[in-house]
Image: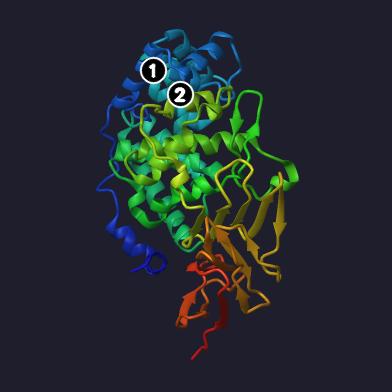
Amino acid sequence: MNRRAVCLTLLSLPAARLAAQNRPDGFRVYSDAPRLFLRPARLKLLRRERERQSLRWEQFESLWAGNAPFAEPGWPAALRYQIAQDEAAGKKAIAWAAGPGTDIRQIALVADWCAPLFSGTDQSRIFGKLQRSLAGLAPKTLAEARNRVFAAVAISEAQPDLAEKALGAVFDGFWLGFIASLRAAKARVPNADACALLELLHAFRDNVGFDLRDTFPGWFKEYPLVHLMAHYPPPFPASENEYRVPADTEIDKRGPDLNKAVLSRAAELAMVAFDSNAPETQLLQGFLMNDRFVMRGTAGIAYELLWANPYQPGLSYYHVPLAQHDAIGGQLFVRSAWEDNASWIGFFDGQLQLFADGSVTRVDPKLAHEPMDIEEATIFFARNANKFRVPRHKTEGVEDPAVDVFIVGLEPGRPYHVEVDSEEMSEEIADPGGIIFLPGVPGGAGVRLGLRPTS
């Protein structure tokens, strides 16, 4: 069975049946503190980074010693307490969480990491905020679900029944619906939202003993490389470091959003930490371990310090195919090369973007256009056309090498008859984004497309 057939099979499986097969045995938290992120191996690594005076620790220490205003004031102080056993930092985190702090994610991390320093008043105030958050409206976004899981885990020792109920409600009330939306291509995870997703995965596995990826393994296996490809080629030169800018439907209106770039890299680091042995994350590690992209500013350094493991071997991302088709989500990302001046095409959220010569251009995939050809792949627009010819190339002395062909602008889920020169006619089904993928079509070949007659 080919990759496309596997994806279509996964899409056809009922969500309820998959959920029944992949469900935690229970939602009781039995782990020891610290429960969120700082499991024994991770905490040991971080304390060794301090002893070694590593690049990331020294940058974090420099900003801390200089009283730099961290973008998130609570959890970096709590992280410093855990790594350096700096009680002054821990008390500073507690004062923020018990006082003006409103961000439940940070408050939960402070509660979990700084509990040994709590006074009675501190605990009642902080736990009160966490309990009230659990009594609020059901989560509708990944960030809200992540916050609820963090709050439940942070109070799990003091109120195990409440925590257990809250965790079960997130799984049944939010997660299964989110997975059903992914399966139906009614939801996607933009790079900036991936940080909340990965933090949710870590918290659930570390404390419930269940890998949420098991509810939709096909999507999660593909996601690291789709995420990697969903960046524009040229980095953005900020004052503190360079950023890889994630694909964004609003970039032509407001330019690069560096907050999204921070969260995208944080997600990548957390992705490698979650599963460092998978080939996909080893390629992602190769993408990450370049000092020019180390986040050195107050918005990103705590994420760098927490998740990065420079001792983890990685594979060169130059081995990643330059065309990534997300058949489950109906997305497509193609690069001409891995150099910073490469051309790039992205089809996501129903929007087709072309990045070339330093700027992004939107293209309406529903209108007829000339084919987009960037050597590694050719994209045809099929709304008002049904015959195409693959452009000819000569690569390293090879005449008309085979290229991947993508036909966009089709009706999602509709079956089509496709005939390539010298090949038998085949039936292809457009993915949820209206894309048909034809691998390895020879240069110069003709492609004919027609709707399959309905019975």
Q: Are marks 2 and 1 in contact (CB under 8 Å)?
A: yes
**Disc 2 secondary structure class:** helix
Image position of 5 with respect to 250: above or below: below
Front one among 168 and 198: 198
**Disc 1 secondary structure class:** helix
Front one among 226 and 30: 226
Relative horizontal placement of residue 152, taking residue 291 as reference (left or right): left
Q: Residue at x 29, y 52 (%)?
A: 23
Q: Which residue is mark 1?
A: 49
Query: In this view, which residue lies farthest toward the front?
Result: 397
Mark 1 or mark 2, which is nearer the start of the sequence?
1
- Amino acid type of the residue that numbered disc 2 sits on in the rendered structure: Leu
Image position of 271 with respect to 111: above or below: below
Location of residue 207 by image quarter: top left
The picture places residue 257, in percent across and down from the top left corner, at: 66, 38
Q: Residues within 10 Å of mark 2 (few under 14, many from 20)?
A: many
The picture places residue 163, in percent across and down from the top left corner, at: 35, 37
Residue 391 is marked as none
On-image quarter of the N terminus: bottom left
- Amino acid type of the residue that numbered disc 1 sits on in the rendered structure: Glu
Front one among 444 and 351: 444
Residue 305 is marked as 2
Relative horizontal placement of residue 360, taking residue 265 as reference (left or right): right
Query: In this view, which residue lies farthest toward the right?
Result: 253
Q: CA distance from mark 2 to mark 1?
A: 9 Å
Residue 136 in sight: no
Q: Residue at x 48, y 81 (%)?
A: 422
